[in-house]
Amino acid sequence: MAYQKPYGMHDILPEEQPYWEHLRRTFRDVCERYGFGRLDTPVLEQTVVFLKGVGEGTDIVDKEMYCFTDKGGDNLTLRPEFTAGVMRSYLEEGMRSRPQPVKLASIGPMFRRDRPGAGRYRQFHQVNAEIIGTDDAAADAELLAMAASFGAALGLGALRVLVNSTGCPACKPPYLAKLAAFLRERRDRLSALDRERVDRNPLRVLDSKEPETRAAIAGVPLLGDDLCAGCRGHFAEVRALLARAGIEVEESPLLVRGLDYYTRTVFEIVSAAAPDAGTLLGGGRYDGLAEMLDGPQTPGVGFAGGIERMILALKAAERSPRAARAPDVFIAYIGAKAKEAAFTLAEALRRAGVAAVFGLGNKGLKAQMKLADRTGAGLAVIIGEAELAEGKVQLRAMGESRQELVPLEGLVASLASRVARGAP
Ligand code: HAM
């Protein structure tokens, strides 16, 4: 093979597309029900947006971004996540002057030079939803409810919704100092990776998957015990609203997230049947992000779901989405004269709204009919020269190998009305 796709990236073949369509359609429906408008931002942002937004010291910024200098000398980065770019757009496009909050939904490709594995790619796709311009706990609860409802509408099966609060600039720094001191005392017992994190990003040690770290941090002080009154009340309201609405969540005191902008509520959704499949959706509140991007203080909360991971979970739950529309008609022909008539007929059918596939490739009838089978078309029109001279063609019901001679005139209208009625 001459060329291969970049390591950790993947092609999405036609047979996979029904899953993607199902996901996009379901996300669109859920966004409409929750009152979100769609926002598309560029795939590239100035690198500084992520340096300041996602934060130096995070895995994403330190190890995983695809950054380059373009021919004009601009430093650009392929977006590793939506939120920093969405906030950049909110600030730059003057969305602050609209009635607040603004609810923005996005969908598209992300790039992280991660270690590829099951459900982990270097180009992957996210659905993303943000509520910007309010610190109301109801916004956190609404997004959690929306994420859970999206998972249910997709057919992901039983989900676990894990929530925690990571505090604010008043209560988090004193806690971090306490945590770092606790970890430093046990540094020798931590894994090599976590030893490095103690000074750089001690919170990340809390959700380490390394067995020696997990054993070493038993009894670690929890931020939940040190939250200030404001954060405590906010988190209590989030949980009370969800409980009232019958949405089950689990408190997860060690849950922290890999991006720097989080304050207060954080959450993750995993499959109950396959928790090892990784986090399907994750998000939280980021009341300091606008200021990190040199904007005015603007609270916000949001989540993103990994489309590839959700599709893996759908497959694990043996959910098959509705298949893509098969062609209505395959047009086959025998001979050069018939080819022109077949091509003209295919175009006329498409104009009339019929999905028609033409037998491309100057193949014999047998090979064309093999292709017709493969496309899944319900009907085939077969044009032969002798019959064509009499203004007739063969109409075959595929799968029944039954065929009849019909006049070419009026065929477009009759096939179009047949398709409109939903008849095969
Ligand atoms: P995140 O946790 O970094 O959050 O990513 C969200 C989801 O994207 C993950 O739960 C996972 O499903 C998927 N994902 C992440 N990395 C990969 C990968 N390498 N391959 C496949 N899927 C992956 C964020 O990105 C935040 N911006 C979420 C957010 C929005 N917070 C507030 N608003």
Image (spheres, rainbow, N blue to C red):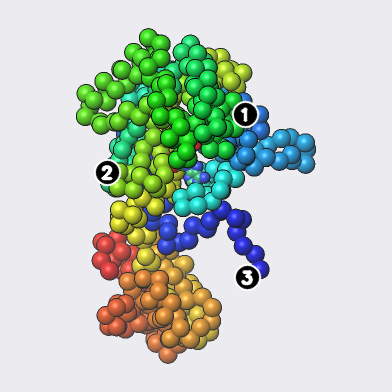
Label 1 neighbourhood size at 10 Å, few (<14), some (14-19), many (20+)?
some
For marks 3 and 1, the one nearer the N-term is 3
Q: Mark 3 points at which residue?
A: 1
Q: In this view, does 195 lie above or below 345?
A: above
Residue at 51% from the left image edge and 75% from the top image edge: 360
Q: Is mark 3 on a helix, strand or loop?
A: loop
Q: What element carries label 2?
A: loop
Tell whether circle 1 marks a residue whose Cβ is less than 8 angstroms from ligand 1.
no
Question: What amino acid is found at the position of numbered circle 1 in the picture?
Answer: Glu
Q: Nearer the viewer, residue 342 or 150?
A: 150
Numbered disc in front, either 3 or 1: 1
Q: Name the residue under label 2.
A: 158
Q: Is residue 9 above or below residue 77?
A: below
Residue furthest toward the top? 229
Q: What element carries label 1?
A: loop
Q: In this view, does 285 lie above or below 335?
A: above
Q: Which of 360 and 243 is in front in this view?
A: 243
Q: Mark 1 points at which residue?
A: 56
- Residue 311 seen from this side: yes
Tell whether circle 3 marks a residue whose Cβ is less than 8 angstroms from ligand 1.
no
Residue 311 position within the rendered picture, expressed as x and y whole percent measured from the top left = 39, 51
Residue at 40% from the left image edge and 48% from the top image edge: 277
User: In which quadrant of the rendered image does the C terminus lie?
Assistant: bottom left
Question: What amino acid is found at the position of numbered circle 2 in the picture?
Answer: Ala
User: In which quadrant of the rendered image does the N terminus lie?
Assistant: bottom right
Residue 270 position within the rendered picture, expressed as x and y whole percent measured from the top left = 36, 41
Numbered disc in front, either 2 or 3: 2
Residue at 31% from the left image edge and 64% from the top image edge: 419
Q: Which of 181 and 341 is in front in this view?
A: 181
Give residue 89's quadrant in the image.
top right
Q: Do the residues labelled 3 and 1 touch (CB within 8 Å)?
A: no
